[in-house]
Amino acid sequence: MADIAVIDYGMGNLRSVQQALRTVAPEASIVVTDDPHEVAMAARVVFPGQGAMPDCMRELDARGLRVAVLQAARSKPFLGICIGLQMLFDHSAEGDVAGLGILPGEVVRFAHDLRDDQGNKLKVPHMGWNQVHQGVDPQPPMGGAETVAPSPAGGGGLGRGSVAAHPLWQGIDQDARFYFVHSFYVQPKDAALVQATTCYPQPFVCAVARDNVFAVQFHPEKSQSAGLTLLKNFVNWNPV
Amino acid sequence: MLAKRIIPCLDVTAGRVVKGVSFVELRDAGDPVEIARRYDEQGADELTFLDITASSDDRGILFRIIEQVAEQVFIPLTVGGGVRRVEDVRNLLNAGADKVSINTSAVVNPQLVADAAARYGSQCIVVAIDAKQVAPGQWQVFTHGGRKATGLDAVAWAKKMQDLGAGEILLTSMDRDGQKNGFDLALTRAVTDELEIPLIASGGVGNLQHLVDGVKLGGADAVLAASIFHFGEYTVQQAKQFMAQQGIEVRL
């Protein structure tokens, strides 16, 4: 029985995820697996994804992994990454495909012809290092002056009316930069799911959480020290 | 907001990093794993490795380099050189590359770009274009390390690669490569304005103002440089601080 199972449904490169987990949890047994039984047996589960969501859904089902993912998302520490975040929702505009329906909401594309405040074209995919604003309240669009006071001891910024910072942000600075590459993003129906937002140029949701599930649009495995900290927090996370 | 990316480029041959002038006259710059680690510490946003000989003997060496770097460096790694088949893409991804750059083979077989993007996702397919000015406001695509003219217009070609599924374009001016007199800004601007996907400008960086110009005047989403970092003129950190002072959003 593995400490961590990384779900492999043939979409994209999982070596980076495995390597980063190995670095933050050298003692843990980590399997990269397409075996539903191994997923079911693992203590915690990482659900990555790259490429197009319709392909990801198809390949997941082709390997008979849907039930294992649904069960893991109900029962144990579960980290979704990139398409692994998007697939948790009801539906995606990418290929007009149904998701797993674990979380309520839609996956939509960035608008065409996006511009920044100086009129420069913003490319899609949204690719590179952008700021992750922890908490429910978005940072001001266009990356203007910070209006939310940074919390003491770095990280864990509190949005207005939000509950305490999620343990996965521990030790990560407010507005730290993470590496993104995506053209679609999630629009949760329930604002209470939102754990962080990023501006491009308008705020979009880049992290969500509910109970034992945490999922991010960015790639912690490619986000240097901030990303490794988040993965370490996940490995040590014991949601009640 | 999204930061402009600074990408050091490591041209690798026979297990060493080298740098040439206009694609010839190679000079040794050191051990790739050591250099990669140094740039990561200095805050590089990504690293690009180009296997500039791509002989079969060197291929094994390159894989070991990528594996070692991927174990220690947690930023995106792009690897290119000698990518001819979808299997080559898979092998590089399995070795630890996050993106694979396709250059000559995209011209020889454009379907490779479509197939690789369909299989692994556009996010990991970079098309590298080596362009040379042939008339005012006109640039042609060259292949085989800049030795072979294709007759293709660089702007139209970049657009076609985007349509086939490339996630990003790495655009190198052959006229400027290794010359240290700055990017070909007109070329960069002409291509980036036609694209919806990000453009990495390459070829000609000799000082930090050139990086600023590439973003501000050329409209590049990312800037790639080799010599100024390899031979200790500037650190990546210095480059980013300078760009930040000039009002460019960077990851510091």
Image: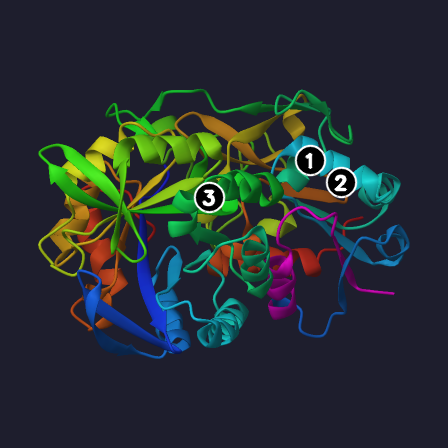
Q: Which residues are the magenta region? A: A1-23
Going 54% across and 58% down the picture, which residue do you hit?
A: B88
Is residue A16 located in the magenta-colored stretch of the structure? yes
Q: Which residue is mark 1?
A: A55
Give the camera-side residue of B78 and B45: B78
The N terminus of chain B - image quarter: top left
The C terminus of chain B - image quarter: bottom left
Residue B236: x, y in percent?
27, 62
How many other residues sit within 10 Å of disc 1, few (<14), some (14-19) or many (≥20)?
some
Residue A233, compared with residue A127, is above or below; it is below
How many other residues sit within 10 Å of disc 2, few (<14), some (14-19) or many (≥20)?
some
Going 41% across and 30% down the picture, which residue do you hit?
A: A200
Please, what is the three-letter code of the amino acid marked with disc 3?
Asn
Residue B169: x, y in percent?
36, 42
Residue A79, compared with residue B53, is above or below; it is above
Residue A204, compared with residue A111, is above or below; it is below
